[in-house]
Image (tube, rainbow, N blue to C red):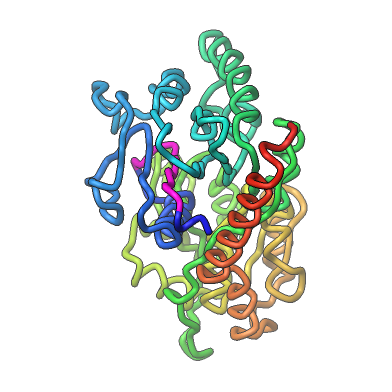
Amino acid sequence: MATNMNIAIIHDWLTGFAGAEKVLLELIKIYPEADIFTSVFDDRKIKQIPRDRVKVSYLQKAPGSLGNRQLLIPLMPRAFENFDLSKYDLVISNTSSVGKGVITRPETPHICYCHTPTRYLWESNLDPRASGSFLKDRISHQLRIWDRLAAMRPDYFIANSKNIQQKIRKYYRRESEVVYPPVEVGRFKVADKKDIKDYYLCSGRLIGYKRVDLAIAAFNDLKKPLFIIGNGPEEKRLRAIAGANIKFLGRVSDVEQAKYYREARAFIFPANEDFGIVPLEALASGRPVVAFNAGGARETIIEGISGTFFSEQTPQCLIDAVRNFNPDHYHSQRLRQRAMDFDQAIFRKNFKDTIDRLIVDFQKNGPPIK
């Protein structure tokens, strides 16, 4: 149904490639004729999306906009409100921040796929970007007011997990449906048992809330090999506290990443994530996961079936979990089968079916009462 409509897809920014951008690629596959609106676009870093598909805001011309996106955060609400979406029959915002704040015609359904309520505004304990000084706190207060009002603009919310569904209800007082994000299961393969190496793996952007420091502290004590994929602003500090048994791999190719996944003894996931794609990538590679018992991991990891949990974000708690954990007790193909529940094809079907059903509801009953 929606494929016959003139569609706009809203995305917060395109300056790096992570989970939200992987979702965007899937949305483009579902709606190949849709236009994409975003605040700023760095086509040197994101080559998967053709430049002519993307319409950028006036912030694209701001000095240093691509390298210092965080400085533009106070300006983004107005930039998204200025987009002219009057010719579109359907608007889909794929957002963890300001994208939901676009303004649409009364007769145009706006459906928001929400990765999280704006984390740096509502959960500064997880993301401290908008706190730490009087000026930042003052700006954050104003942005929270705008964000709460912006959350009233979508006609429907789709959450990327039950975890986020609860947060949407708490911070925005809106109900939502759940469609889990896609995992590129086909990119990963399972290794023969004889090819499993004697190292554990951690992967992700090296920023504070990912808690890679916790994994390092635990493995410093365990003296077991830990490989870390990724880079980021915390890298220098993390290298300084890491022992000789910890190896930083930096950014690696997709092929290299898949190899490190399938040859690891197990995957370490110490973060409290909204959903968390990387544990499912580990499962797709036939490797079990040791995860912090919080956030989206509770919906993907099954205790004793696909991995195990540790209950507190402390080195000792993770140390105890690793010592009591035997990766050899897990069957690689069963782990991969768990990841298949979140495959890209599953996402595309669930997302399209949900959108079509919500459009029918909108056309039959008009905008829902909020």
Give the answer, above or below, for where 112 lies relative to 228. above
Is residue 11 a member of the stretch shown in magenta?
A: yes
Single out the residue that lies furthest toward the front: 364
Give the answer, above or below, for where 57 lies relative to 197. above
What residue is at 58 percent from the left and 79 percent from the top?
336
Can residue 10 be seen here?
yes
What residue is at 42 percent from the left and 32 percent from the top?
86
Which range is magenta?
A: 5-15
What residue is at 60 percent from the left and 84 percent from the top?
332
Can residue 229 be seen here?
no
- Between 214 and 242, the one nearer to me in the picture: 214
How many marks overall?
0
- Between 135 and 356, the one nearer to me in the picture: 356
x then y, percent, for residue 256: 35, 70
Give the answer, above or below, for where 268 lies relative to 190. above
x then y, percent, for residue 176: 71, 45
- Between 83 and 200, the one nearer to me in the picture: 83
Left or right of 131, for residue 188: left
x then y, percent, for residue 88: 43, 40
Is residue 30 a member of the stretch shown in magenta?
A: no
